[in-house]
Image (cartoon, rainbow, N blue to C red):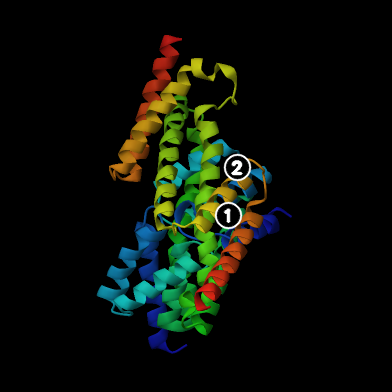
Amino acid sequence: MASGKMKKVWQLFLTFLKIGAFTFGGGYAMIPLIQKEIVEKRKWISDADILEIVAIAESTPGPIAINAATFVGFRICGFWGALFATLGVVFPSFFIILVVSFVLKEFQSIQAVRYAFHGIRAGVLALILKALWSMYRQCPKNTTAYIIMASAFVLTAFLNVDVLIVIIGCAVFGLISSAVISRRERQ
Amino acid sequence: MIYLELLWTFFKIGAFTFGGGYAMLPLIQEEVIAHDWLDIKSLVDFIAVSESTPGPFAVNIATYVGAEVGGILGAFCATFGVVLPSFIIILIVAKCFAKFSNSKMVKGCMAGLKPAVVGLIGAAMISIGGTVFAPAGIHTAILSDVSFYAALVIFLFSVFLVFRKVHPILIICISAVLGILFGYMIDYLI
């Protein structure tokens, strides 16, 4: 690797290390930070690129934060850029959680902490409800979408169908129904 | 071999999760509980931890489950597994498909996946709701249980805060304080 490129790869690593260490809640919370660090400060990519990155990160499997880091890294510096951007964004989580996992158990033997977690669980349920609501708002509102929503819910909640099968089935169903719709429109 | 199993399980989770945040929760719940790596209560507790620590939920939960089950090497394998599919797929997409997100195939799949995720998170809420409101299982005496009402009050108050756009970490802190207050109050009264 040329030394100029190596320097850039290292800068990518450090930048994503910072992004990984300061995004709470992950995913979309990371996009403004990428914008500030990569677009405004370093000027490595443009604002239009950010939109494309978000679109791709959303429509490929895997956590959005990882997708975005890999994509930005690749755009700027090819494979090594992708590798070090991804390493950078994962590192802070990895070490913090490793420490937490050793400490958490010690704390949970304290009665007050156990009560605290009783409360926290109810609070987390509210956070998930919020996630459900924002996913619902992003979702297309038509009969097909409602049918998929309802069947995914019933199949996993009450009929214990494997989640993987439900995901694959819904993707195929979406693919077929949009193919049918576009054919009908053409006729 | 536990390390390979961690790697493979989280590889699957990474490969079949679409959308950010809690979209992967239903799949994680199914896999992690089926392997007996965590129970649903510790999973919910960990969501709170993950909200209050930096980094993507997927990486956090992978590291945590890996560490619980297989120590540092386990944490490494699970995290590596959850990141790998993204990494490979994004490299391929970035190299080969200039207009990937505009292609008909992708749009069609997403038309099915977006509503599916809504349904799946709804299903996850049912089972998590069970552990929150009826930790001892659903039974007829549930409405006479004080802790059921305590959980309900905390939940409704948190919903109010969530939709007032209060920061998640603050909500977790508030519900922790309420949990402690109610816990000792119930102990004192009964």
Instruction: Name the residue type under label 1.
Output: Ala
Residue at point 41% right, 57% down? A26
Residue A57 picture location, percent across and down: 46, 68
Q: Chain of mark 1?
A: B
**10 Å crowding of disc 2: few (<14), some (14-19), many (20+):** many
Residue B23 picture location, percent across and down: 50, 54
- Give the side of residue A47 with respect to residue A173, left or right: left
Q: Is residue A59 above or below residue B38?
A: below
Residue at point 47% right, 23% down? B148
Q: Which residue is mark 1?
A: B75
Q: Tag on residue A157?
A: 2
Closer to us: B107 or B155 = B107
- Residues beneath discs 2 and 1 located on the same chain: no
Q: Is residue A112 above or below residue B94?
A: above
Closer to us: B31 or B84 = B31
Q: Dot 1: what SS? A: helix
Residue B57 picture location, percent across and down: 47, 53
Quarter of the image for residue B36 reads: top right
Q: CA distance from mark 2 to mark 1?
A: 29 Å
Q: Is residue B147 above or below residue B95?
A: above
